[in-house]
Image (cartoon, rainbow, N blue to C red):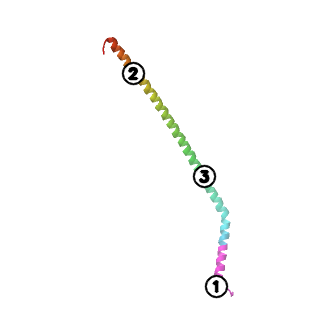
Amino acid sequence: MSDRPEWVNEVVGGIADLRARLERIEGDLPHMRSDLMSRIDRLQDQLSRMLEDVGVNYASADRAIRAARAQREDINLIEEQLSALTRLVHKLQAEVNSLRGEH
């Protein structure tokens, strides 16, 4: 028998258990690091794809907005031309009425 008190033996046994656990964790660290880095790489790839998708969608939306604005400008030009033609028709109608003697 040892001259150490029982609690000292328990502490020494606990330290030995902790040492064994620490060695096991240290042995697993390279594998865990590798797994973690692989996961980070996969997440980075997913994020990159998402950002590319967002960029493509924004570009499509911008193109659609530009097309809508161009059509709006075309409509405004046609409205101006129609307004000018309407004024011309009214003027010509007034001249025709004047030539006929109508007021």
Front label number (3 vs 2): 2
Residue designated by label 1: 6
Residue designated by label 3: 44
**Local secondary structure at mark 2:** helix
Magenta stretch secondary structure, dominant: helix
Q: Tell me how far mark 3 sits from mark 1, CA to CA.
A: 54 Å
Q: Residues within 10 Å of mark 3 (few under 14, many from 20)?
A: few
| Residue 46 colored in magenta in the image | no
| Residue 17 colored in magenta in the image | yes
**Local secondary structure at mark 1:** helix
Which one is in front, 40 or 61?
61
Q: Residue at x 44, y 26 (%)?
A: 78
Residue placed furthest toward the left: 102
State the quadrant of the N terminus.
Answer: bottom right
Sooner in the amino-acid sequence: mark 3 or mark 2: 3
- Amino acid under label 1? Glu
State the quadrant of the C terminus.
Answer: top left
**Local secondary structure at mark 3:** helix
Residue 22 x %, y %: 66, 70
- In this view, 70 is above or below 58: above
Residue designated by label 2: 87
- Which residues, given as a range, are shown in magenta? 1-19
Sooner in the amino-acid sequence: mark 1 or mark 2: 1
Q: Residue at x 61, y 55 (%)?
A: 40
Q: Residue at x 65, y 74 (%)?
A: 18
